[in-house]
Image (cartoon, helix red, strand yellow):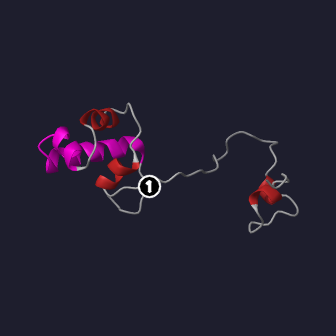
Amino acid sequence: MNRNELILVRDLLVYARECIKLDYDSQKEFAKRHGLSQSYVSDVLAGKRAPGEKLLAAFGIEKVVAYRFIPDSGTSGASNPLSAPGFHPDAPLRESAGLPAD
């Protein structure tokens, strides 16, 4: 696994399960060593709860939120404010969107 690539949650869960299986006797031992409850770890690995910062750090992973445009999403006719006259990428976001400053 490339340490700089973005990974999906499902891949994170597979990776976490395998790490625990290889490095610890049980989920309970992993949880205890990292100051987490066993039920929380179990819920995260089952996909019932989102992994928190402390659990992610135990695997050397950080949460990154990303957004991207959908290629050819069929939204023809929608305007693109990023190409609007007067838009400048260095301008404050609210100002460039024509919104009042807070």
User: In the rendered image, which quarter is residue 85 located in?
Assistant: bottom right
What x and y, as percent, mark residue 24? 14, 47
Between residue 30 and residue 11, name the one nearer to us: 30
Residue bearing the label numbered 1: 6
Q: Residues within 10 Å of mark 1 (few under 14, many from 20)?
A: few
Q: Residue at x 37, y 40 (%)?
A: 10
Q: Is residue 7 left or right of residue 101?
A: left
Between residue 82 and residue 40, name the one nearer to us: 40
Q: Main secondary structure of the magenta part?
A: helix
Amino acid type of the residue that numbered disc 1 sits on in the rendered structure: Leu
Q: Residue at x 29, y 53 (%)?
A: 58
Between residue 23 and residue 78, name the one nearer to us: 23
Q: Residue furthest bottom?
A: 90
Does the magenta segment cover residue 27? yes
What x and y, as percent, mark residue 13? 32, 42
Q: Is residue 40 left or right of residue 22?
A: right
What x and y, as percent, mark residue 99? 83, 51
Q: Which residues are magenta?
A: 8-33
User: In the rendered image, which quarter is residue 31 located in?
Assistant: top left
Q: Residue furthest right?
A: 85
Query: Which element carries disc 1, helix, strand or loop?
Result: loop
Count of numbered marks: 1
Q: Residue at x 39, y 34 (%)?
A: 49
Q: Residue at x 20, y 49 (%)?
A: 33
Quadrant showing the N terminus: bottom left
